[in-house]
Image (spheres, rainbow, N blue to C red):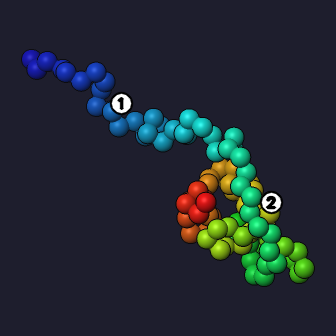
Amino acid sequence: MAKRTQACSYDLCFDLDEALTMPETPVATLPAPSLPTVFAAGVCTVCLEAFEAGKGGKRMPCGHLFHDTCISTWLARDRSCPTCRCPLKAHK
């Protein structure tokens, strides 16, 4: 009989729950970035609603525009642009 040398079973070596765990520092605990407020036209790609006339939106470093509350909520979960996935820290 062959001797087993692995410390864990084959299934545990490829456990997706383990591989997809959240990072040690949750994104929500990181400081919120300071994004410039600009006049916006068009549609916010997070909520798919139009920008109100005369109201500003937040511009990501990559140039995409979003409602302030939409991008704040998004960035609490993921530090990248919702449209192009450009990492926020890449533009510091």
Res. 33 visible in picture: yes
Give the amino acid at mark 2: Thr
Across and down, in percent, residue 84 comes to 56, 69
Outermost residue, front side: 92
Outermost residue, right side: 54
- Determine the image quadrant of residue 36: bottom right
Q: Tag 1 or tag 2, which sits nearer the N-term?
A: 1
Q: Are marks 2 and 1 in contact (CB under 8 Å)?
A: no
What kind of element bears circle 2? helix
For disc 1, the neighbor class at 10 Å (few under 14, some 14 to 19, many from 20) is: few
Circle 1 residue: 12
Query: What residue is drawn where x is 9% and y is 17%?
Result: 1
Circle 2 residue: 69
Res. 85 visible in picture: no
Q: 18 or 81, which lies in front?
A: 81
Placement of 63 over or under 5, stated as above or below: below
Asked whether, in this view, residue 57 is left or right of residue 16, the answer is right
Across and down, in percent, residue 58 comes to 76, 68
Across and down, in percent, residue 72 comes to 75, 56
What kind of element bears circle 1? helix
Give the amino acid at mark 1: Leu
Query: What residue is drawn where x is 80% and y is 74%?
Result: 38
Across and down, in percent, residue 16 comes to 43, 40
Q: 67 or 13, which lies in front?
A: 67
- Determine the image quadrant of residue 80: bottom right
Placement of 73 over or under 14, stated as above or below: below
Q: Which mark is residue 43?
A: none
